[in-house]
Structure formats: structure tokens, C-alpha cells
Image (cartoon, rainbow, N blue to C red):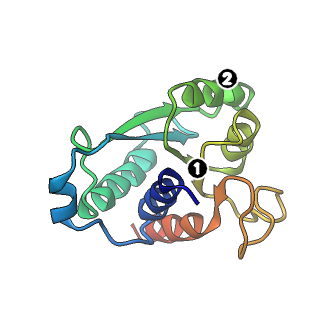
């Protein structure tokens, strides 16, 4: 496994809350690359529930040392409930070259999977990811969807 692949895997795991933050000393010794996260939500940008989910997400990223504007950039896209245009929005988000995408809901994850096979997708809000064909099993995600992060983020949002 190449070093870049290892770093990407660590970043994806960290995003889901499954890994500890890198030691501060190690980060201080090297200039950091700003990571890019794509977030695709089904509602509107001013939706109170979507904003609550986003606040929890940003809080947890901050607790793990990922600060917007310093070492991470987040590109948001909102579907507005318009299922017909999810594929267009997914392609637009992929064109921004995110390191990872956070997605909410089956229709959004499905549109993202059709748009890319290389960008990892961390998702929540999918009742049956195996039955829906998003992952091969909960033990082995397959493709680029991360089931471990799916479970942790969903539980975090349900508690908030």
C-alpha cells in the first residue's frame, strides 16, 4: 500500500470518528495539505435539521483537530429534495476533487456512486445499505463506501 493511500484511509477513518487525531507535534513539523470534504445533503441549505447535523459534524471535526480554513475545506451541496437533479449535483461535487464525501440518504449515495468510483463516500441515513446494493456487507464495504463511518455518524446524529 502506498503512503498516499494510507494517509487517505486514515483521513476517511478519522472523518467517521473512528480514529484518534494525529499528534500535534507531528503536524507542527510538516506543512499540512488542506483536505477537501464534499458534503451532499438532501434538504435545503437553511433546513434546521440539516444545519443541526452540520453543527455536530463540524464540532466533531474540530475536536479531532480538523479546523475549517486551516487544514480542511468543506464544499456543501444541497439537493432541495429534487431527486431528478441529484446526478447533476453529484457530478458537480465530484468535479471539485474532494478527498472524501459525506452523503445523507440512499438516493444521494447512489447518485454519487454512479458519478465516481475513486472518491470515498461516507454516508448516513440509509436504512439497509446491503439490501440497497450500496455495500456488499456491513463487515466488508467494498467499492468506495465506508460502512464503519456510516454507522458511527448515524449514531452520532441520532443522539444529537
- Residue at horizontal 71 percent and vertical 29 percent from the top: 87
Residue 38 position (above or below residue 151): above
Q: Could you say which is closer to the camera, residue 44 or residue 2?
A: 2
Dot 1, how many residues are within 10 Å of its Cα: few (below 14), some (14-19), or many (20+)? many
Where is residue 42 drawn, in percent x and y? 58, 40
- Residue at horizontal 44 percent and vertical 50 percent from the top: 49
Screen quadrant of the N terminus: bottom right
Total residue callouts: 2
Q: Residue 55 shows which numbered tag?
A: none
- Residue at horizontal 32 percent and vertical 52 percent from the top: 58
Which residue ends up furthest to the bottom in the rendered image?
A: 139
Q: Is residue 107 left or right of residue 155?
A: right
Screen quadrant of the C terminus: bottom left
- Do the residues under discs 2 and 1 have CB atoms within 8 angstroms? no
What SS does tag 2 mark?
helix
Q: Is residue 13 left or right of residue 138?
A: left
Q: Could you say which is closer to the camera, residue 47 or residue 76?
A: 76
Q: Which residue is mark 2?
A: 88
Q: Which residue is mark 1?
A: 104
Q: Marks 2/1: CA distance?
A: 16 Å
Dot 2, how many residues are within 10 Å of its Cα: few (below 14), some (14-19), or many (20+)? some
Where is residue 104 drawn, in percent x and y? 58, 49
- Residue at horizontal 49 percent and vertical 53 percent from the top: 8
Comes first in the chain, label 2 or label 1: 2
Question: Image quarter for residue 11?
Answer: bottom left
Which residue ends up furthest to the front in the rendered image?
A: 2
Where is residue 121 drawn, in percent x and y? 60, 50
What SS does tag 1 mark?
strand
Where is residue 62 drawn, in percent x and y? 25, 57
Amino acid at each position: 500500500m502506498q503512503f498516499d493511500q494510507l494517509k487517505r484511509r486514515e483521513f476517511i477513518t478519522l472523518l467517521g470518528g473512528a480514529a484518534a487525531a494525529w499528534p500535534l507535534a507531528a503536524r507542527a513539523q510538516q506543512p499540512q495539505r488542506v483536505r477537501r470534504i464534499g458534503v451532499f445533503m438532501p434538504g435545503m441549505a437553511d433546513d434546521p435539521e440539516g444545519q443541526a447535523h452540520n453543527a455536530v459534524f463540524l464540532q466533531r471535526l474540530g475536536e479531532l483537530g480538523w479546523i475549517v480554513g486551516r487544514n480542511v475545506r468543506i464544499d456543501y451541496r444541497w439537493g432541495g429534495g429534487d431527486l431528478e437533479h441529484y446526478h447533476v449535483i453529484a457530478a458537480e461535487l465530484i468535479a471539485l476533487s474532494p478527498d472524501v464525501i459525506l452523503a445523507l440518504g440512499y438516493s444521494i449515495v447512489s447518485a454519487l456512486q454512479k458519478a465516481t468510483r475513486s472518491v470515498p463516500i461516507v454516508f448516513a441515513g440509509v436504512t439497509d445499505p446491503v439490501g440497497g446494493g450500496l455495500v456488499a456487507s456491513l463487515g466488508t464495504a467494498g467499492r468506495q463506501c465506508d460502512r464503519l463511518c456510516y454507522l458511527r455518524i448515524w449514531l452520532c446524529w441520532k443522539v444529537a
